[in-house]
């Protein structure tokens, strides 16, 4: 995680030092209406859904490619390569603590009884407790983000010392390869979530050691961020974006699941990127806890306190008001 923090710091300084502003199509004095972003292969993001439902009004989205991880996505927002990016809230805390000029504005994914990430082992594995993870390899999609934080929280809560925690080895494994790596014995524990988890469970032979839902309950885990200079220059655009995403979240809550999946499949078909849509049948929920993606204090303070205890916040604990705001979200008044 220290390596991740060093990289985040360097990129934050690059973003602020270069004085790069968001490169959009707005005329002088006008708010920017074209928002560049990164997508995800075979998946539909909430902004893409909002645009398809007509919730973004005059705002248009410009896809520039697919992100490799949440930390990479918010780094791209920091350096001005995209207008907004999304990541695990703990990753946002680290980047903001490294002086990156970003602020979260709306939650976009979370954890609940339907949507969760699990740490899976093979049936018959001798791993049955946190102590059994000492010296073992845990495969996950990226380091310094959601699942590394969940893993270390689990280890500490179950009594492992700092020295023992350091002997547990999280390693990066591409999500599409994680199940196979577990079954082939290349890793001892596989972090699986969403459609990849459900596909793996269909085959059988694996079970969870623990899940993030069992550990922390329901919570919004990740948020979309903008650069603070973009927020100042384009408050109307941000308000429209956030409200559109918020309405899309609520649309998924109130629309029959089969219709949501059909809409996602139609969006994939229309954008014509030659993607496999077979995983869409496993969709359950966004997992977002707050109405319209409203962000609760605990969804950032939990990770601020954890990172501070682990010595990751060298510049001190950032204020919650610097990390996120609900001011652009129309659901704030209703709450």
Image (spheres, rainbow, N blue to C red):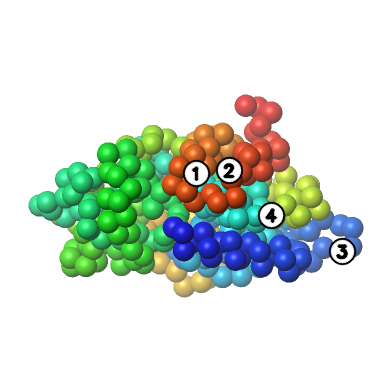
Foreground mark, 1 or 3, reads 1
Q: Residues within 10 Å of mark 1 (few under 14, many from 20)?
A: some
Query: In the image, residue 218 lies at what x, y percent?
Result: 42, 35
In the rendered image, which residue does mark 3 sit on?
27
Q: Secondary structure at mark 2?
A: loop
Question: Label 2: which residue?
Answer: 317
Q: Position of residue 24 (x, y in %)?
A: 76, 65
Q: Is residue 89 visible?
A: yes
Give me the disc on residue 308.
1
Asked whether the residues under the numbered discs 2 and 4 touch, taking CB atoms below 8 Å apart as contact, a structural biologist would say: no
> What's the distance in space between the residues labelled 3 and 2, CA to CA?
38 Å
Q: Secondary structure at mark 3?
A: loop
Q: Residues within 10 Å of mark 4 (few under 14, many from 20)?
A: many
For the residues labelled 1 and 4, the Cα–Cα distance comes to 20 Å
- How packed is label 3: few (under 14 Cα within 10 Å), some, or many (20 or more)? few
Give the Cα distance between marks 1 and 2: 7 Å
In the picture provided, is 45 more to the left or to the right than 119?
Answer: right
Residue on which disc 4 sits = 101
Distance of label 1 from label 3 (alpha carbons): 43 Å
Looking at the image, is 22 positioned above or below residue 319? Answer: below
């Amino acid at each position: 995680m220290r390596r991740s923090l060093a990289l985040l710091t360097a990129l934050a300084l690059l973003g602020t030092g270069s004085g790069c502003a968001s490169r959009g199509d707005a005329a002088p004095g006008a708010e920017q209406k074209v928002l560049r972003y990164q997508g995800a292969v075979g998946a539909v993001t909430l902004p893409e859904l909002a645009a398809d439902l007509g919730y973004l009004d005059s705002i248009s989205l410009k896809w520039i490619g697919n992100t490799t991880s949440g930390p990479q996505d918010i780094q791209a927002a920091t350096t001005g390569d995209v207008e907004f990016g999304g990541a695990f809230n703990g990753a946002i805390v680290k980047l903001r603590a490294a002086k990156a000029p970003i602020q979260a504005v709306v939650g976009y994914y979370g954890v609940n009884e339907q949507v969760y990430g699990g740490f899976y082992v093979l049936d018959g594995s001798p791993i049955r407790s946190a102590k059994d993870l000492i010296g073992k390899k845990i495969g996950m999609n990226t380091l310094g983000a959601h699942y590394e934080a969940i893993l270390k929280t689990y280890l500490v809560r179950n009594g492992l010392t700092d020295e023992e925690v350091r002997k547990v080895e999280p390693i990066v494994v591409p999500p599409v390869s994680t199940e196979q790596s577990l079954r082939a014995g290349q890793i001892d524990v596989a972090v699986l979530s969403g459609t990849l988890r459900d596909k793996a469970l269909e085959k059988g032979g694996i079970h969870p050691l623990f899940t993030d839902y069992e550990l922390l309950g329901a919570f919004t885990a990740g948020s979309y961020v903008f650069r603070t200079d973009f927020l100042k220059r384009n408050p109307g655009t941000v308000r429209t974006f956030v409200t559109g995403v918020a309405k899309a979240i609520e649309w998924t809550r109130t629309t029959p699941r089969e219709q949501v999946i059909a809409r996602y499949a139609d969006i994939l078909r229309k954008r014509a990127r030659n993607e496999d849509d077979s995983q869409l049948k496993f969709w359950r929920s966004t997992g977002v806890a707050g109405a319209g993606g409203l962000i609760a204090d605990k969804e950032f303070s939990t990770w601020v306190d954890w990172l501070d205890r682990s010595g990751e916040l060298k510049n001190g604990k950032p204020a919650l008001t610097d990390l996120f705001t609900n001011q652009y979200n129309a659901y704030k008044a209703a709450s």
